[in-house]
Amino acid sequence: MGLALPPTSFVFGTGRGIGLGQVDRAWPSLIGCMCVGLWFAWGTCTPRVRADETGQLVWSAPAGCPGTERVGALIEHWLGPGWERIYAHSLRIQGRVESQDSDYHMELRIESASGESTENLSASTCDTLAEVAALKASLAVEPEEVLDDVTEPAPHAPPAGEPPHASEPAPVSGAVLGLRAGFESLVGLFPDPTYGVNLSGALTWRHLQIEGGFHATNRQRVSYPGGSSIGVDLQLLAGSVRACLLSPISRVALATCGGATIGAMRGQGRHVAGDRTSRQAWVALPLGAELRYPADSRVGLWLAVDAILQLREVAYHVRNLASLFRTDRTALSASLALDVRLW
């Protein structure tokens, strides 16, 4: 929704009628007076304001103040390149700056997934109001990421057409450390679906996340057919390392992840003679997606779904009997955990 100024009409006339002959003789003077009057009205009555609209950013300010391009650059500092596309459906900013006396006053309206707000702000310079508008708009959609950066002063965006100075590198956000604890369900790892627990830690930057975790499944009993009591109890203990690319969508963080998992599959024999326990190496490559929904600034719910490619085949059998169990090439896992940000 843009900001529009009401049209102004001007009527020029005289208090008495003018005869046809008089018009013929006076038309050059009348036209000259009308041109001078229109020029004067345009220069004094029309406000020197430009209102630009780029995507969901609507900004109007007096001449000499930051325009839409400058405000967009300030928002890009907090939210990163491509913020217009990423938040196309979750962020709208409307700002109107006016000069009154020696100060500037701004009416700022922000619509985001967390709600709507309208504020009236004042400052001695319109540059300050532009920086405040960019910061408030960024806080509305990415409060955690912006608060991580706000400890350092926000750099002024260069004027339009001026490249950034080489001696001023772009700031890099600090990493956020988080811990997760939750449950996971696996299909295709053992003969029947199984469940387990996982404990992991993650270092998160603006668009990158590095994770390391530990996984343990419950024991699953596998027996020979026909009601035989001879069989094996299976359990997997593994560690994983993975990297994720983050794509924030409003308050939700969506990630695409890949990595490696290495562990040991433990098989404990039942009703067999001799060595009753066998441990075999297990190696797999998980590839999947993660989603984190923040409950507040530190705590959130974490959901992950992975397709697992098992690189090393694991098999068990009892001496003098047929094969009892052999892993499949692929498996699926789904995890739900509580995510806590430590800093």
Image: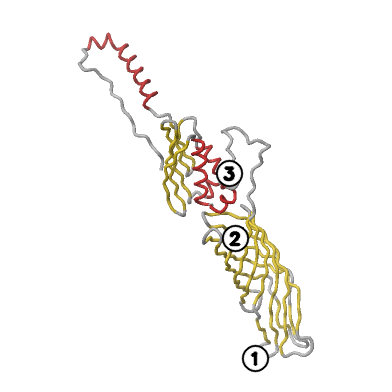
Which residue is label 2 attached to? 341
Q: Nearer the viewer's eye, disc 2 or disc 3?
A: 2
How far is mark 2 from mark 3, CA to CA?
23 Å
Residue count near mark 3 (Cα–Cα under 10 Å), binned few <14, some 14–19, many ≥20: many
Q: Earlier in the sequence, mark 3 or mark 1?
A: 3
Q: Which is in the foreground here, disc 1 or disc 2?
A: 2
Report crowding for label 1: few under 14, some 14 to 19, many 20 or more residues within 10 A (C-alpha).
Answer: few
Nearest to the eye among marks 3 and 1: give it: 3
Residue 11 in picture, x, y percent from top left: 28, 23
**Which quarter of the picture shows residue 322?**
bottom right
Quadrant of res 155? top right
61 in relation to 301, above or below: above
Residue 299, picture quadrant: bottom right
- The residue closer to the viewer here, 135 or 337, is 135
Residue 36 rendering spot, x and y as whole percentages: 36, 17
Q: Amino acid at mark 1?
A: Gly
Real-space Cα separation, disc 1 to disc 2, in angstroms: 50 Å
Image quadrant holding the N terminus, namely top left
Q: Identity of the amino acid at label 3?
A: His
Give the residue pinned by disc 1. Answer: 227
Q: Is residue 31 left or right of residue 211?
A: left
Where does label 3 land, which residue? 77
Q: Secondary structure at mark 2?
A: strand
Q: Nearer the viewer, residue 18 or 251?
A: 251
